[in-house]
Image: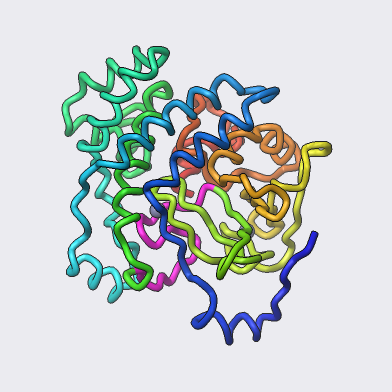
Amino acid sequence: MVQRILEPAEIESIDHIAIARVRLPERAEVFSARAQRLRQLAPGNPIGPYLLLMATVADAQHAVAQSLDIPPLSPETLDRAGEHCMPLLPAQDAGAPLAAAALFDRLAATAPELAAPLATLRAMPADALAGAIQALLGLRPSSDIPIDTTTAPLLMAALQLDRTVLASQLREQDMPMLDVHTVCPVCGTPPVASIVRIGGRYQGLRYLHCGLCATEWHMVRVKCSHCETTEGISYYAVEGQGEALKAECCDQCHHYRKIAYMEKDPMVEPLADDLGSLALDVMMGEAGYGRANGNPLLWLADDGDDDDHGLETAEVRG
Ligand SMILES: [Zn+2]
Ligand SMILES: [Zn+2]
């Protein structure tokens, strides 16, 4: 693999000049690229039918995203986040009623297999929806609002839609410099996976990808995206499945996150590739590493086993 290796001093010197610190999402691209990738990964995949179902959800997100009217963040909000080195969106801002209503209407027309969870969601008042989303984000205890694994991916899809449209309206210079580099500068969520990009000013650089708003932020390579150590990092891939996706594992905190390489496959999409590679999760679980956080589109029933690949809400908040 051809890698662009930079010395730390070199990174310091060019960090503020050449490196694009963030890569904001384009609402015309995010969900359509994800849908396409999910369909590409589905054949022969152990959860192929589920990947195809999530591709249908991504199609609906794409259709709604093109015309969804989300008010941009105010200059005061941007200033306040910049001053306090905090993410732009306050953590408790978990409501996405506009996006949810539009997405669920669209899916009701295009995804008959989702009729049952959609009926549940469409019957919920806005405050109940917001409460359920807060529970999924770990902002409210699941003892307060139990997590329904059948509606959870659709609620997260609504939140993705809302936040991605919001993020797509931001400018690079709006981004606050955070003290913590392991959460999204827009919405404060830990990354779902990371990607080494090709092309233009992103060439050869690694970005962490937000599973909610699809913002990407730069982090140097060979560094744990969970505890930020640069010691004891190693890479694993499933034999026979190519080099485009690996697990970046940390021997300090014993967590891993997947990393996708566009040089190996220009179609990789961090969230889709993470979802489509459960064999790698199983392998890492057996090797004693825990997922740093879950994938917003996959919720497994809590069987009381805390090592359940880290997909529980408690692990999501990490
Ligand atoms: Zn985000
Ligand atoms: Zn670590």
- Give the residue displayed 57% in from the left and 83% down from the top: 14
| 305 relative to 204, above or below | above
- Residue 86 vertical placement versus 72 (above, below): below
Q: Position of residue 292 (x, y in %)?
A: 56, 48
Location of residue 69 (image quadrant): top left
- Where is 49 relative to 219, above or below? above
The number of discs equals: 0
Q: Is residue 70 visible?
A: yes
The answer to whether any part of residue 246 appears in the image is: no
- Residue located farthest toward the right when viewing the structure as drawn: 240
Position in image of residue 207 (x %, y %): 55, 60
Colouring of the image = rainbow
Residue 178 within the segment the image draws in magenta: yes
Q: Nearer the viewer, residue 172 or 251?
A: 172
Is 318 left, or right, of 103 in this rendering?
right
Residue at 50%, 34% (x, y): give it: 35
Lateral position of residue 124 relative to residue 213, left or right: left
Q: Position of residue 280 (x, y in %)?
A: 70, 38
Q: Quadrant of residue 40?
A: top right
Residue drawn at x 45%, y 58% is: 183
Is the magenta region chiefly helix, strand or loop?
loop
Highlighted magenta segment, given as a residue range: 175-192
Task: Say whether residue 83 is left or right of residue 30.
Answer: left
Q: Residue at x 28, y 15 (%)?
A: 119
x, y percent for residue 31? 44, 40
In the displayed structure image, the side of residue 134 where residue 56 appears, left or right? right
Residue 213 part of the magenta-drawn span: no
Figure quadrant of the N terminus: bottom right
